[in-house]
Amino acid sequence: MSDTVISAEGVLVERAGRRILDVGRFDVARGERVAIVGGNGAGKTTLLEVLALVASPTFGVVRVGEKVAASESERVAARRRMAYVATTPNLIDASVERNIALPLAFRSVSMRERRARVATAVETAGLRVPLRQSASTLSAGEAARVSLARAFATRPEILFLDEPFARLDEPTRVGLVREFAAMLGGLGATVVFVTHDRAEAAAIATRIVVLEAGQIAQEGDPARLLEHPHTRAAARWAGFENIVDGRLLEPHAGHERVEIAAGVVLDCVGKRPASEDVAACFRGESVVLAKSVDEIHGSIRNRFPARVTSVAAGQGGVTFVAIAVADGGPSIVAALTAESVQALGVVVGADVVAAIKAAAIHVVV
């Protein structure tokens, strides 16, 4: 028996003559928690809706277990094994209890069983409001918990969520995400969710799928994908400040070499065939700035002259310093502490030497 609980094959979605989604294969295994991520318009919600049988693809099939949900009756039967939590809680103007029990009424669950399931769902969701309280009086965080409890009450085989925490303020969101990750771990649930938030994806997901222009750009273990992207789309989502287009040269001494400007070649870790269309991707914190080459210590292989073009304060005491590489060359961002900026005397127009360790640079396509 297959461990796959839901799969999409050859899924294509077109709207107004425009291709929105093009996914050859997408499988979700029992107990997996899959985060679908990507930029605006990448097709995240469309893929989620297709998998949840909320929307139909233009071409392709969705299997729930071993069975294709083709007819409307088959889709309705399959949807009863799922729960879908939208960005907006969509609560009715009634009590908390009635909101949570609503899908159970549609499923003709007995009143006694409804009460038992509601009580369990309330506890699981960490909801601490009176069940008779009107849903219209709830805070955003409480409404989000009611929405989750309503989903839990149906005891779904698969739980779909479309950015359910996006409308919450940060302290509420961070706390609820932490609790939600613990809830799911205890339930052993199969979850597919959409998020823009890296921390949320890392806390909840066992696998991350990056979409770009409706196609899967990269997928894998959260920790590895965040630190070792293979594509520009994954690097952008992972928050790499520098994704510098270049030309991949022949490898030398065990290192890939990417030419990012005339006479500026970066050594990177790894080997792959030479190519015209690649980018060197690295974090701002990996860029070291100095007044001269003599001030750069250690075995940093990549060193090149640059000129400061902007200085901007960031969060957490970080200062982002943009530098131009050679005349007409690309811009690179270094993330420095305020103390380092002051010690270097960094100002716009200053000439500096930049250095980046080869191990910190990933070559992406």
Image (spheres, rainbow, N blue to C red):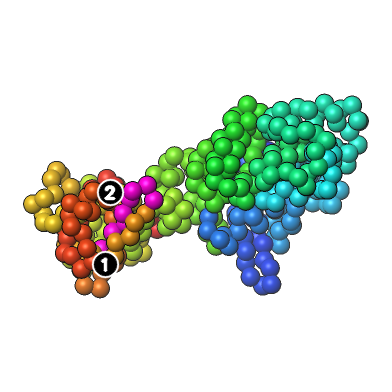
Q: Kindly identify the residue that appears in the image at 85 percent across and 29 percent down.
A: 115
Q: Residue at x 27, y 45 (%)?
A: 359
Task: Give residue 337's mark.
Answer: 2
Q: Nearer the viewer, mark 1 or mark 2?
A: 2
Does 305 sit above or below residue 29? below
193 above or below 309?
Answer: above
Disc 2 crowd, CA 10 A, few/some/many (<14, 14-19, 20+): some
Q: Which quadrant holds the N terminus?
A: top right
For marks 1 and 2 on the same chain, the one whose residue lies earlier in the sequence:
1
Disc 1 target residue: 309
- Name which residue type carries label 2: Thr
Quadrant housing the C terminus: bottom left
Magenta stretch: residue 135 in it?
no
Residue 281 can be seen in this image:
no
Nearer to me, 306 or 303: 306
Q: Is residue 225 left or right of residue 207?
A: left
Q: At x 67% / y 72%, what residue is drawn?
A: 17
* Residue drawn at (78%, 28%) of the image: 119
SS at mark 1 in the image:
strand
Q: Which residues are magenta?
A: 315-323
Total of numbered circles in the picture?
A: 2
Badge 1 vs badge 2, beta-carbon distance below 8 Å = no
